[in-house]
Amino acid sequence: MGEVVGAGWLAHAPTIVVPEATRRELNHGEDSTLVSGLHQLRREVFDTLDYDTVVVLDSHWATTVEFVVTAQDRRKGLFTSEELPRGMCRRPYDFPGDPELARHVESLLRQSGFETGEDAGRGYDQGPFVPLKLAYPEADVPVVQLSLIEGLDPASHLALGRALMPLRDDDIFIIGSGMSFHNLRIFRDPRSAPIAETFDAWLRDAMALEPTARADALTHWSSAPAARLAHPREEHLIPLMVATGAADQDAARLAYNKTFAGLRLSAFHFGES
């Protein structure tokens, strides 16, 4: 019998997949330690687990009424970053999909009382593009993408993750794509660094709690120190709720604790590695 061999949440800063010279130009001559952290995550997690398909939860895709799943046989196109077009312009991608798994995901969600739908035409934005390009440069793993729901309710997205737990029979890796600090209005303001440090420290402590307390802390994340300064809108945090819900009783492991543009960022994963 298979299992959800892993679930995780990681940063998708667009600069991590551009050439090093461009990264240094954008970062005052230095390379971001986030790059080494993500390569470490690839070596220690993605490359060591045995799984057939990836399900991606993307902070850049939120639908209004129902959770929507991509159901293409293949997703192929050109990606241009809205945030960094000169560094990532018309970058090709070509990943296999898994329509059968997409419909299984829909069935699981409906059984848990969620409304669902399919999207057979959606392309990639940076949420899936960045981690998939980094983790699977050969584009040899089928990918299904699942939307968030507008309103971004933490409890609902933890429940969404729990609804995906039966995928334990299908050798699935679940990736939440987001960031532990996402306030673009103050992104390069020196005053943002202590905000990121404060919230990231709280998040690391919350993720180290036992599962029931961990879920409660995430449900009430907006009461954390510096929460709304780190996340004026929580779309980049919510994919963590889904990964955590799917992890059930698994302990969270700190995958990396690095910096990007001077801001503290962490990633977490669940499962064997």
Image: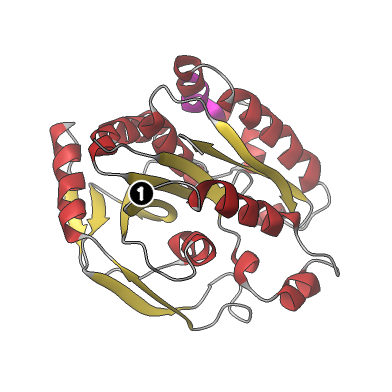
Give the answer, above or below, for where 80 lies relative to 32.
Answer: below
Of residues 2 and 231, which is closer to you in this image?
2
Q: Residue at x 26, y 39 (%)?
A: 167
Mark 1: few/some/many CA within 10 Å (<14, 14-19, 20+)? some
- Give the x, y percent position of residue 77: 37, 80
Of residues 245 and 98, which is closer to you in this image?
98
Q: Secondary structure at mark 1?
A: loop
Residue 11 lies left or right of residue 59; in this view the side is: right
Residue 228 lies left or right of residue 150; in this view the side is: right
Q: Would you name the residue on which mark 1 appears?
A: 51
- Give the x, y percent position of residue 52: 31, 53
Res. 69 image quadrant: bottom left
**Marker count (numbered):** 1
Coloration of the structure image: secondary structure
- Give the x, y percent position of residue 239: 44, 43
Q: Residue at x 64, y 46 (%)?
A: 181
The quadrant of the picture occupied by the N terminus is top left
Q: Which residues are magenta?
A: 216-221
Residue 229 lies left or right of residue 79; in this view the side is: right
Give the answer, above or below, for where 3 lies relative to 54.
Answer: above
Q: Residue at x 57, y 77 (%)?
A: 88
Give the answer, above or below, for where 107 lies relative to 21.
Answer: above
Main SS of residues in magenta: helix
Q: Is residue 50 magenta?
A: no
User: As shown in the figure, which amino acid type bears the numbered disc 1?
Assistant: Tyr
Res. 78 image quadrant: bottom left
Q: Is residue 220 magenta?
A: yes
- Give the x, y percent position of residue 74: 26, 71
Of residues 240 and 227, which is closer to you in this image?
240
